Amino acid sequence: MKKIKIVWVFVFAINLAYSANNTIEEELSISVRDCTLYGTLVIPEDSEHPVPLFFLIAGSGPTDRDGNSTLLPGKNNSYKMLAEELQKKGIASFRYDKRGVGKSKFEISDYKIVFRDYLQDIIDLINMLSEDDRFSEIILAGHSKGSLLGMLAFGEVEAEAFISIAGSGRRIDEVIFDQSKEQLSVLPGGEALLDTIKTYFNLLKNEQTFNYVHPYLLSIFHPVNQGFMIDWLRYDPSEEIAKIEAPILIIQGTNDIQIKEEEARILSKANPSANLVFIEGMNHILKMADIDDIGAYSNPDLEISDNLIKEIRNFIISL
């Protein structure tokens, strides 16, 4: 690969941070079209030859490069832990704050992000990183919503393989409706709210926006989110993963309360050449925790799954 020109924005003792576990961390600032994105590149210190680069796309909502969300109390640091564990296996990684999140926040408060903005950012970032001769190949990995974004980007970039972690196999309206059905079934008026959800999604699928949103459903259908949702609804993950003609690893935790095991099976059925792995006891944020342990989402001391690291490592070295 050719050498890339990247803007170095933060230095730890002459541009690099050497941690106690033989890791080199580089804080990167990369301009993409109308904004600047900030990310962390983690490289095994002892690597004398080019190493694989694990490029991680974060999940839904305001989830930052370390796996933490402003919607939840405390931190879980799941992505940070993943990067640190992979470097012990000789695998470099890049994770970043997507636009509007973490250090990549905008100064303009009313800027509306659409799904394709995230997609184009991934393409731009990978095209830049693919020119760095420290990396032998790029493995594109998406967690949760990032799984679909990774599928869409895969055909547009130079990548060796794709990994889906806790990614849905169905279109987002179907996933949200099923999740809502479970939550609303115990509430008075729940059936009426489910009908309202169907109505809202039908409007969005026809690219129609609306100003009034039932207060209980604002977190999903707030007017500021509707353009993003219209864009998102255009894509079916099972159709997109079927287009990938490269090694694929599909990983799903059995204790994930957000994405069910069936979603992984749908993806596997859509692309039978993919490797499908279920991690017993792993939840949505890659931690080993009971299925009803909500506290795990805010516990930075709870380690991520060893089996997750093992499966990713074995998949990458087999390429």
Image: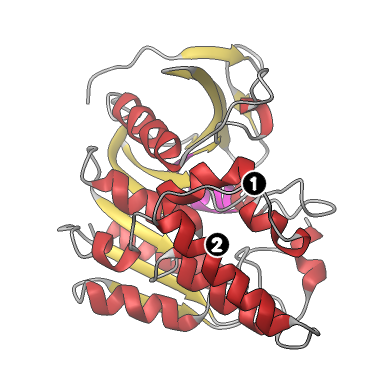
Task: Determine which residue is flagged by label 1.
Answer: 211
Residue 61 horizontal/vertical position (percent):
62, 49
Seen at 71% across and 76% down, the residue is: 289
Residue 171 bears which disc, if any? none
**Classed neighbour count for the residue bearing mark 2: other residues with Cα under 10 Å, few (<14), some (14–19), many (≥20):** some
The amino acid sitting under disc 1 is Asn
The amino acid sitting under disc 2 is Tyr
Residue 174 horizontal/vertical position (percent):
46, 72
Is residue 86 located in the magenta-colored stretch of the structure? Answer: yes
Q: Report the span colored magenta.
A: 82-94
The answer to whether the residue labelled 1 contacts the one labelled 2, judged by CB atoms less than 8 Å apart, is no
Seen at 29% across and 30% down, the residue is: 130
Task: Determine which residue is flagged by label 2.
Answer: 200
Residue 112 horizontal/vertical position (percent):
56, 32
**Tag 1 secondary structure:** loop
Asked if residue 48 shows in the view, the reply is no
Seen at 34% across and 78% down, the residue is: 266
